Amino acid sequence: MPTIKEVNARAQEIENRDNLTVSQILKMDVFKYKMELVQRAIDELKAEEEEKENFDLLENYETLPEDFRAIVDAYSEEFNDGGDLYGLCAKYVDKLQEIGYTAEYGLDGDLHSLRKMTAEEVEELLAVHLKASDFTEEDIEEFNQNH
């Protein structure tokens, strides 16, 4: 959900785009116009958030960081060879999570929804790893610095 500050800034942008004169605004119900601006701003900001959430990095290879592309390249041949695609996806996602990204995959080994991990996902992953093994404080600091 957008913040009030974001909504106000977007409402101002929309008002500028509307390019109404003072006399046009005065002829209108100003309160109603301002409320419409706020609603339009909220709608635009929500649409942008949804677009970002649905942005699949696999479809935008050229925008990926170099370390990410190295992982993609390393696993591409294995995916093309077939075999246990589900198991390969699990290994692939584990490697991606090491650099702060994640993806989803089905039983058929179809990888999709590749994206940057949220802070909550990083915390969950770290909690799971802390329970599963004995990380040192240096390991945790290094992980936090890289993500």
Image (cartoon, rainbow, N blue to C red):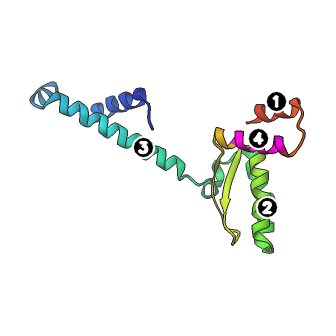
- CB of mark 4 within 8 Å of CB of mark 1? no
Of the residues tagged 4 and 3, which is closer to the observer? 4
Q: Position of residue 45 (x, y in %)?
A: 41, 40
The residue under the point 79% across, 61% down is 75
Distance (Cα) linking label 2 and label 3: 35 Å
| Left or right: 114, with 73 as reference point | left
Residue type at the position of mark 2: Tyr
Residue type at the position of mark 3: Lys
| Residue 128 is a magenta residue | yes
- CB of mark 2 within 8 Å of CB of mark 4? no
Task: Pick whichever, 107 or 27, lies toward us.
Answer: 107
Q: Is 22 drawn above or below residue 33 in the view shown?
A: above
Residue located beneath label 2 in the image = 75
The residue under the point 30% across, 38% down is 39
Which is more N-terminal, label 3 or label 4? 3
Which is more N-terminal, label 1 or label 3? 3
Q: Is 6 drawn above or below residue 61 in the view shown?
A: above
Q: Is 142 drawn above or below residue 97 in the view shown?
A: above
| Left or right: 132, with 23 as reference point | right
